[in-house]
Image (cartoon, rainbow, N blue to C red):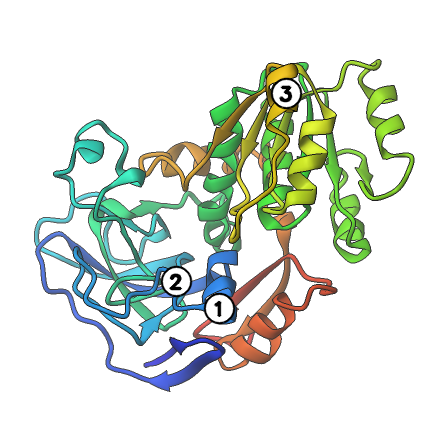
Amino acid sequence: MRAARFHGKSDIRVEDVDVPQIHEHDEVLVEVLWCGICGTDLHEYMVGPIVTPVTPHPLTGVTLPQVLGHEFSARVVEVGRSVSDVAVGDRVAIMPAIVCGRCRFCREGLGHLCEKFACTGLSAETGGLAQYAVLKEYQVSRLPDSVSDVEGAVVEPASVAAYGIDRVGVRGGDIVLVTGAGPIGVLSAMYASALGATTVVIAEPNPNRAALARAMDIGPVVDPTQDGFADFIAETTEGRGVDIVAECSGSTPGLTTAMDSVRTRGSIVQTGLHTRPATIDAMRLSEKDISYIGSWCYLITDWPRIIRLIASGKYPVAKAVTTRIGLEDVVSRGFDVLVNPTGDQLKVLVSPTTSG
């Protein structure tokens, strides 16, 4: 089969590899339908290896090269003898986390914090940027007919966004600010709106991304670098500041905007990952009595809930998808486009079986 494998910094090759096989009774072999390129994949491409293992991973034992891709939908083609949740022919969304089930966090129901955490497409035998992949039964969730293959491929980033918003407890009537209109930013904005936020403001300085976010009609999209931004927030909130901020830019300017815009005793969730130390005004954090909360991945049991929300139409995640391509173009029309700071794409989906 064809697969996009990460060998090292700036080195992704589409190669012929063996079709993976089921080895355990609780495994599922799937044919990949669509796979998204994630910001984590981009970090690996630009400056990695970071989380892709150069020595045997403690849980999976794998090392580079790694088949990338952890945001994907698929069709089941074979199941192990003890698998009962899915059957051959089912369409599924993939929950890519691989957990030990034994550490203190796994036993507390917090598998996303597993001490030996691994991930399909980053530190596992297979990944979604290939024609076939092998998963554990707990990693696959059946898609209803009302959820498309494309939507199924967005369940993973949609769950990242949802977990961040859930960490700060958005309530109906809240005014929410999202800093950064990347894929996680727009999905966070959609989810906050689905929960009943009265107004969701998106702060985005990149005019291309701002235009894409504006076309989704979630709420106002404003350039935080312009002089009128603070006045806009004050006018929107009657001078109080926003109730909740989802900081999705992973940048010091985005965090500063969050701190300046949130109301006294409001909350900020750090959903975007900072790849370098950030500067924070700790005195302002104290003076405004702000709750600043981290967010890592998602609850690994959340897939059925997120799929139901997408099926209801209240979480229109397909709007975040801006381009669909074939596997052979994954570098030139995928990675190279997305790492361009002036790029005009949000979520790029890749099909290993079609030309896109």
Q: Nearer the viewer, mark 2 or mark 3?
A: 2
Which residue is depicted at the point 75% across and 40% down?
A: 203
Q: In this image, 52 relative to 291: left or right?
A: left
Mark 3 and mark 1: Cα distance apart in space: 39 Å
The percent coordinates of residue 181 (x first, y second) are 68, 46
Which residue is depicted at the point 44% across and 47% down?
A: 156
The mark nearer the N terminus, 2 or 3, is: 2
The quarter in which the N terminus is drawn is bottom left
Tag 3 and tag 1, C-beta contact below 8 Å: no
Label 1 CA crowd tier, 10 Å (few <14, some 14–19, many 20+): few
Amino acid type assigned to the residue bearing label 2 in the image: Ile
Tag 1 and tag 2, C-beta contact below 8 Å: yes
Amino acid type assigned to the residue bearing label 1 in the image: Val
Q: Is residue 77 above or below residue 177?
A: below
Label 2 CA crowd tier, 10 Å (few <14, some 14–19, many 20+): some
Q: Determine the image quadrant of residue 70.
A: bottom left
Q: Which residue is mark 1?
A: 47
Q: In this image, 335 relative to 227: left or right?
A: left
Which residue extends farthest bottom? 16
Q: Which residue is mark 2?
A: 50
Q: Determine the image quadrant of residue 133.
A: bottom left
Amino acid type assigned to the residue bearing label 3 in the image: Gly
The mark nearer the N terminus, 3 or 1, is: 1
Picture disc at residue 196:
3
Q: Is residue 290 above or below residue 295?
A: above
Nearer to me, 18 or 106: 106
